[in-house]
Amino acid sequence: IGSPAPEFRLTDLSGRTVTLAEYRGKVVLLDFWATWCASCEVELPGLKGLHKRFSPDDFALLAASVDEGGPEVVARYASEKAVPFRVLFADQAASSAYRIFGLPTKFLIDRDGIVVRKYLDGVAPADLAKDIQSQLDRRPS
């Protein structure tokens, strides 16, 4: 917290390479999750609500899957659950850089690329929304 978010180069469901740098200027909620994670599934409706609530011009929700079952498993899950935000495939480098030891783990990253909050299992959508709005209300440096 208070440090630059580690950069990454990950692939999304469509096979495109995604970097954190391309989201500079937006508030980012980076969610590390897995299809087999029961807590992750419980949080999904709240994350969908956040995605719908905040403008894509200012906010991005990125869901980085740590599944090892291959892209087909994650793509099927995302389709069945109608995941509306960008799903990425987290690699070992990203998981290590963000020190992921349990799921779900989320990071709120400000417009300047600084980690402002880290959330472990069980954060309420209302608390996330409050923190996201607080960052959106701040002007970039």
Image (cartoon, grey):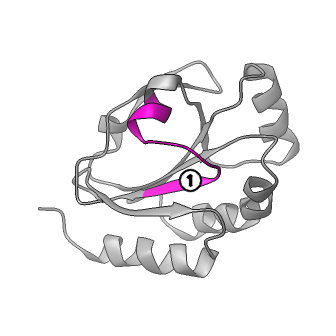
Quadrant holding the C terminus? bottom left
Residue where numbered disc 1 is placed: 105
User: Neighbour class for label 1 at 10 Å: few (<14), some, many (≥20)?
Assistant: many
Judging depth in this view, the residue of 12 and 115 nearest the camera is: 115
Residue drawn 34% across the image and 55% down it:
26
- Picture residue at 23% right of the left edge, 47% below the top: 4
Q: Residue furthest right?
A: 80
Q: Is residue 78 shown above or below 102?
A: above
Q: How many marks?
A: 1
Q: Is residue 139 left or right of residue 130?
A: left
Q: What are the residue bounds of the magenta stretch? A: 94-107
**Quarter assignment of residue 139:** bottom left
Image quadrant in which you'd find residue 18 = top left
Residue at 64%, 53% (x, y): give it: 104
Give the structural element (helix, strand or loop) at label 1. strand
Point out the residue furthest to the front here.
101
Q: Which sits in the foreground, 53 or 109?
A: 109
Find residue 127 and report its horizontal and vertical position in percent.
54, 79
Left or right: where does residue 132 sit relative to residue 127?
left
Residue at the image position 88 percent from the left and 42 percent from the top: 80
72 relative to 12 in the view: left or right? right
Across and down, in percent, residue 72 comes to: 80, 21
Q: Nearer the viewer, residue 33 or 72?
A: 33
Q: Position of residue 132 (x, y in %)?
A: 43, 71
Q: Is 59 or 45 nearer to us in this picture?
A: 45
